Every structure is written in C-alpha cells, then in structure tokens.
Amino acid sequence: MFNYENAFSRNIGWLTNTEQLSLQSKRVAIAGAGGVGGEHIVTLARLGIGAFNISDFDVFEEHNFNRQAGAFVSTLGRDKMAVMKEVALDINPNLNVKTFPTGIDNNNVDEFLDGADVYIDSLDFFAHQARKLVYQKCQDKNIPVIVAAPIGMGAATLCFTSDSMGYEEYFRFADCRNENEELVKFLIGLSPSLMQKSYLVDPSTSDFLAKKAPSLPMGVKLCAGVAASFAVKILLNRGQLVTAPHGLHFDAYKNKMVKTWRPWGNRNPIQKLVFMIAKKVVLKAN
C-alpha cells in the first residue's frame, strides 16, 4: 500500500512536514514531456507534487536516448506523454495527472493552465508560437513561469511572476521582423552571458534555419534541479526568488555561475549588440 508520507520522508529536513504535505495539493503545468520536460516530471513527482497538467504530441525515437528520461529501447515509438505519465504514477500512484496529447494551442491552453500553481516551460526550443501563447496566458492569469534551458553543460534559468518584468518586455519579440529573429531574441535572453559559446566544438550542429541544436544529458539534469528549486520557492513562498530581468546561468564545464541582469531586457544596449552578432552567426544574416 502506497503511503505518501513514507514515500517522501527523506525530503523532510530540507522541507518541514507541513510543507511536504502542502506540496501534495499543488498542481504544476508542464508543456513538453521529452528532454527537460521528462526530467521535470520525474523530479517534481519525487519531490511530492500532487498534480500535473502535461502535454506532448511526439513519440520517442533513438536520437532521444542521450538525454530524455523516458527514452528506452522498450519505449521506442511510444507517446512521450503517455510514457512519462506512467513513470510519474509509478513514483506516486495517487497523482492527479491531466494529459493533453495534441500539444497546446488556442483551443486548449486555458484548460491546460486550469488550476496550475506554476508553469514550467519544457517546450522544444523551436516551438515558439506555442511558447508565446502559453506565456501570455500565464501572464493574464498571474501564473508564475519558470524556464530552464539546457545549454551545453549548463542550465540557464529565467522566472516571470506578477511582480517581475513581463516576458514580452524582457524578450521584445515584437521588435523582430520574423520568427527566426524571435528565436535569436529568446536565445540571448535566456543566456545573456553566452558562457557556452567557447566550447561548442562543431558549430554546424546548431542550425536555426533547420530548427536543430545539440543537447547534452548533463544540461537537462541540471535544468530539472534548478527548475524544481525555483518551484519550491514559489509553491512554499520561501527563499529568495530570482526573477526577470535577472536570471541565473550555471555552467559546469566553465566552472561558473553567473547572475545575469538586463534592465530593459533585450532593448538593453548590450543585448542589442549581442543580438546583431548572434543574428549574423546563427542566421547568417546581415
């Protein structure tokens, strides 16, 4: 017989008994159940979160093996969301899990965010239209947003709350001429320090126009730890929360942790320069 208090008793000490039990009543929305999404689901289920809204329309393939929590020979061809729901229920059979197998769009975004205490962005980097839709809805509904991106051997993290700079004010997507420029703005907004650029040994593997980029398991694992820690601070209302226009970027390869700060977001003069350089590099644009 599954017992919640026994299952998560080793969390006690870093969390109080009262805090642990309160996590049982919290709901986290996670869009994407692949790389970072799968790790978020596993980490938060082991933390003792009691309810999830999860979405994904993709299936597991061999190229997912290097980093995705649900990718095994036994799950090849299976729906990512269904697999990760099974994994989460195998950790906590009392979980309440709502699933959205067609992804997130205008028709279901309100239902996807219904009851969510926090949203953790796990969408594919290039799923930009869905990301903007969910971010705007979260802003309208005062739902905190956490995004932790695996970049190289590190994790770059931003958090948007009702008290922080808004996502559009920070990223400035409206200043862009097309979606590719918006993706560049998203990249440099996530990682203003660009620590990772010095050890990308084969730049040809990162192709914005083909919508592909390399990703390592270390970065994905780090993201899950950072995002869950941010979620704890939001859900339990304790601890200092770093919110936009501030961000965190930890890189284990570079042995560095940088707390970034970009007042005016991507309209910051430094960011404007970074944008012009990054656009030439990743889009091969003038």
Image (cartoon, rainbow, N blue to C red):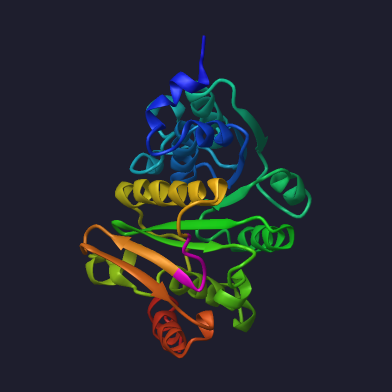
**In the image, residue 92 above or below residue 52:** above
**In the image, residue 61 above or below residue 152:** above
The quadrant the C terminus occupies is bottom left
**Residue appearing at x 46%, y 28% in the figure:** 75
**In the image, residue 162 above or below residue 219:** below
Q: Is residue 78 magenta?
A: no
**Residue appearing at x 50%, y 74% in the figure:** 245
Q: Position of residue 267 (x, y in %)?
A: 53, 86
Most frequent secondary structure within the magenta stretch: loop
User: Of 187 and 193, which appears nearest the observer?
Assistant: 193
Q: Which residues are magenta?
A: 241-246
Q: Position of residue 132 (x, y in %)?
A: 64, 64
**Residue appearing at x 46%, y 35% in the figure:** 16
Q: Position of residue 110 (x, y in %)?
A: 76, 50
Q: Quadrant of residue 106?
A: bottom right
Is residue 59 shown left or right of residue 29? left
Q: Is residue 137 visible?
A: yes
List the single residue furthest toward the top.
Answer: 1
Q: Position of residue 151 (x, y in %)?
A: 36, 60
Q: Quadrant of residue 29?
A: top right
User: Of 35 and 286, which appears nearest the observer?
Assistant: 35
List the single residue furthest toward the right.
Answer: 107
Q: Count numbered badges in the picture.
A: 0
User: Of 140 and 163, which appears nearest the observer?
Assistant: 163
User: Of 87 and 214, which appears nearest the observer?
Assistant: 87
Q: Is residue 206 visible?
A: no
